[in-house]
């Protein structure tokens, strides 16, 4: 068992509470990965002071140079990919293939961020007056508070921290308390690659102990948060009072539509991966299957057989396809929704109970579960469950499919399987979601494209791609008048 620390100004520090919390393996709760400082507001204050004191130097480091350091982070991550993936599987349970993918996303994001250091494009535009030039460019903002969830312990922090740093901001990072070990390794790598010690600071602890003080701290200018919509709303409220710049990436209730002309086996591969990959614990997980009645029986027959054949267990075993839920609380949530589904009249077609066979007895496993006879208004079709539960809704037209898909307070990811190009284009236009896949599952974002959702999935910002660089920087507009005289806009040229 390892002992981990906060890292503030490059130094390892105990929390001011002196208390620690444990990080355990959800596939085998007897295994303690490490202990971490249970920090509080005092630790946040120290970290913010450290970040603030570094800002004036860091903001003046040329952006291409900042990008070069992030490239080195990518190189180190590449060299340590397997080791980090194994640690991640132990601390949060998802299978090795997926944790390798999570680290790879961090690597890809690093190389994209490095190249963005040479772009960070501004604009220039002609002036309406002679001998005058108008330009705009991007400037750093200050200190960014980064608050991340546990389901992508490497990818999500890199989506936020790389652009924050390339844009010239300093960082106070609070990772989820279920996955602090991957975060700790990540911060060590940032420092090893050459990020100056005070520029990045990590403070471990809970949402109440560390998250809230970060949001409320007057010297934190930017909040980038990924997590539940419930917490996101409290952050918007508290941060809004100080007019902070806030990016919120929140919950989802994603659906895959399968039309009667779809390639059935392709759509089956998609829904299995979308619904049960990461044990359904992705913000983009497929939790609703909207299935055309003409192919319903054939599709469901195959889907149930393949779902029941999925192998559950410890993700370090390469044959395992589905890992545990993150903790006992999350398994209780899944159980609660399964009971609600039954009470509301949906029919359990498979799963619906704990998996306790063999090695699964020591962890928080739940059998992949499929509900039939679901109508769009049922609780299990409306609320985010964040577990291996798929609700199947029968439809008989494209209009009905899109309207069922849009019947949600969320709007993150979506998918349609069809061979009809007209149907595909109508879906692209009419589906209310930040992301739509055509003939692909609801999961599978690439780091160089904008990522985020509509409605209660967020507040309009995007991570990934070029858009996140706008979030982490401020626009400066400059007018250069080389006429040698006073030129009054809107007056002297009229
Ligand atoms: P969560 O909201 O419980 O916690 C997220 C983070 O916020 C954690 O670090 C937590 O400690 C911290 N936190 C909790 N309460 C806080 C508060 N009051 N103030 C400040 N910080 C606080 O979410 P989770 O259980 O870690 O993650 C699952 C949720 O995240 C799901 O709803 C999922 O859809 C969402 N998610 C969204 C995306 C996306 O990009 N849209 C990606 C991954 C996960």
Image: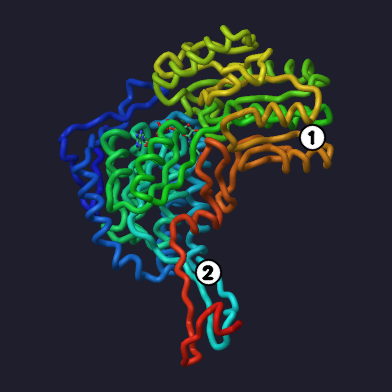
Residue under pointer 2: 122
Q: With 333 as the anchor, is 261 left or right in this view?
A: right
- Taking the spot 44% from the left edge, 50% from the top edge, the residue there is 160
Q: What element carries label 2?
A: loop
| Quadrant into which the N terminus falls | top left
Query: Residue 72, percent across and down?
Result: 42, 60
Q: Which of 381 and 281 is in front in this view?
A: 381
| Spatial separation of the CA atoms under disc 1 and disc 2 | 40 Å
User: Is 129 or 152 nearer to us in this picture?
Assistant: 129
* Residue at point 30%, 27% (across, down): 32
| Whole-percent x, y for residue 442 in the image | 63, 35
Q: Position of residue 201 (x, y in %)?
A: 29, 50
Q: Is mark 1 on a helix, strand or loop?
A: loop
For the rendered model, the colour scheme is rainbow
Residue depicted at x 50% and y 43%? 459
Side of 470 relative to 189 (left or right): right
- Local crowd at mark 2 within 10 Å, few (<14), some, or many (≥20)? few
Q: Is residue 41 above or below residue 483?
A: above
Mark 1 Cα-neighbour bin, 10 Å: few <14, some 14–19, many ≥20: many
- Ligand 1: which quarter? top left
Q: Earlier in the sequence, mark 1 or mark 2?
A: 2
Q: Is residue 276 above or below residue 308?
A: below
Image quadrant assignment for residue 406:
top right
Per the image, the residue denoted by label 1 is: 418
């Amino acid at each position: 068992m390892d002992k981990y620390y906060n890292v503030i100004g490059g130094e390892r520090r105990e929390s001011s509470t002196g208390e620690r919390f444990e990080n355990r393996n959800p596939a085998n709760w007897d295994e303690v990965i490490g202990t971490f400082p249970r920090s509080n507001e005092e630790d946040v204050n120290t970290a913010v002071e450290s970040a603030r004191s570094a800002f004036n130097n860091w903001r003046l480091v040329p952006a291409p140079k900042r990008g070069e350091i992030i490239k080195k982070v990518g190189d180190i991550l590449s060299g340590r990919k397997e080791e980090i993936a194994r640690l991640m599987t132990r601390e949060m349970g998802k299978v090795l293939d997926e944790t390798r993918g999570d680290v790879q996303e961090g690597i890809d994001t690093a190389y994209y961020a490095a190249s963005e250091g040479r772009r960070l494009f501004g604009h220039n535009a002609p002036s309406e007056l002679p001998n005058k030039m108008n330009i705009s460019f991007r400037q750093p903002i200050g200190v960014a508070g980064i608050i991340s969830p546990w389901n992508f312990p490497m990818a999500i922090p890199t989506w936020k921290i790389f652009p924050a740093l390339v844009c010239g901001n300093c960082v106070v990072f609070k990772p989820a308390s279920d996955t602090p070990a991957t975060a700790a390794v990540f911060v060590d790598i940032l420092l090893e690659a050459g990020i100056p010690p005070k520029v990045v600071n990590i403070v471990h602890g809970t949402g109440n102990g560390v998250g809230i003080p970060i949001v409320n701290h007057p010297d934190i200018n930017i909040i980038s948060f990924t997590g539940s919509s419930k917490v996101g709303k409290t952050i918007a409220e508290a941060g809004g009072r100080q007019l902070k710049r806030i990016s919120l990436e929140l919950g989802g209730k994603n659906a895959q539509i399968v039309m009667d002309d779809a390639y059935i086996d392709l759509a089956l591969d998609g829904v299995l991966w979308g619904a049960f990959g990461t044990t359904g614990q992705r913000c983009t997980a497929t939790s609703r299957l909207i299935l055309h009645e003409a192919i319903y029986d054939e599709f469901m027959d195959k889907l149930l057989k393949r779902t029941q054949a999925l192998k559950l267990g410890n993700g370090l075993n390469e044959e395992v396809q589905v890992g545990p839920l993150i903790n006992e609380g999350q398994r209780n949530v899944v159980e609660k929704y399964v009971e609600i589904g039954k009470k509301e009249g949906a029919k359990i077609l498979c799963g619906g109970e704990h998996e306790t066979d063999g090695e699964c007895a020591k962890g928080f496993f739940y059998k992949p579960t499929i509900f039939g006879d679901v109508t769009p208004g049922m609780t299990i079709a409306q609320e985010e469950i964040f577990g291996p539960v798929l609700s199947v809704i029968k439809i008989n037209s494209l209009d009905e499919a899109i309207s069922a898909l849009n019947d949600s307070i969320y709007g993150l990811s979506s998918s349609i399987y069809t061979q009809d190009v007209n149907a595909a284009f109508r879906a692209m236009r009419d589906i209310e979601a930040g992301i739509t896949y055509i003939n692909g599952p609801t999961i599978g974002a690439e780091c160089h494209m904008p990522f985020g959702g509509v409605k209660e999935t967020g507040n309009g910002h995007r991570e990934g791609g070029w858009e996140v660089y706008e979030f982490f920087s401020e626009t400066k507009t400059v007018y250069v008048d080389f006429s040698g005289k006073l030129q009054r806009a809107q007056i002297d040229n009229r």
